[in-house]
Image (cartoon, rainbow, N blue to C red):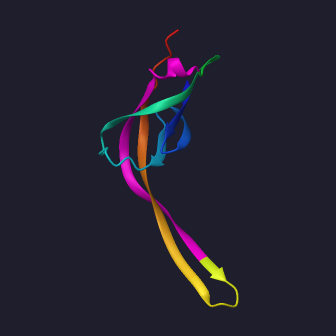
Amino acid sequence: MYAIVRSGGRQHKVAVGDIVEVDKISTAKVGDTVELSTLLVVDGDAVTSDPWVLDGIKVQAEVVDHHKGAKIDILRYKNKTGYRRRQGHRQQYTAIKVTGIPAAAK
């Protein structure tokens, strides 16, 4: 059984026991339980994609860690003008462990 969930503007495929990196959830502390909205649930051959059924299904996950991603270097350069700009970025992430995917009511 797996589900497609939405978090931080991105979609992730998750199953019970998976550890997934999502954009930082600033309100959650390590050990807290969070709920993720579900877009699709696949249970064997049964695929649930009906939005009215999926409104009641929330994937349960536990916050494992908050950390920063790899450094990204942004360089801007224009030829023959002496224009050079350097910028760096490290994205904030939250690692979550999926603890439960409720089955869709039939």
Viewer-nearest residue: 84 or 42: 84
Furthest-top residue in this view: 106
Position in image of residue 76 (x %, y %): 61, 77
Viewer-nearest residue: 86 or 30: 86
As drawn, is 86 to the left or to the right of 32? right
Q: Quadrant of residue 3?
A: top right
Q: Quadrant of residue 29?
A: top left
Position in image of residue 18 (x %, y %): 49, 37
Q: Quadrant of the N terminus?
A: top right
Furthest-right residue in this view: 79
As drawn, is 78 to the left or to the right of 28? right
Viewer-nearest residue: 34 or 30: 34
Position in image of residue 11 (x %, y %): 56, 40
Residue occupying image coordinates x 30% and y 40%: 31
Q: Which residues are magenta?
A: 50-75
Residue occupying image coordinates x 59% and y 84%: 84
Q: Kindly tell me whether residue 16 is visible in this rendering.
A: no
Residue occupying image coordinates x 62% and y 91%: 82
Q: Kindly tell me whether residue 88 is visible in this rendering.
A: yes
Residue occupying image coordinates x 50% and y 71%: 88
Q: Assess whether residue 7 is covered by the magenta stretch.
A: no
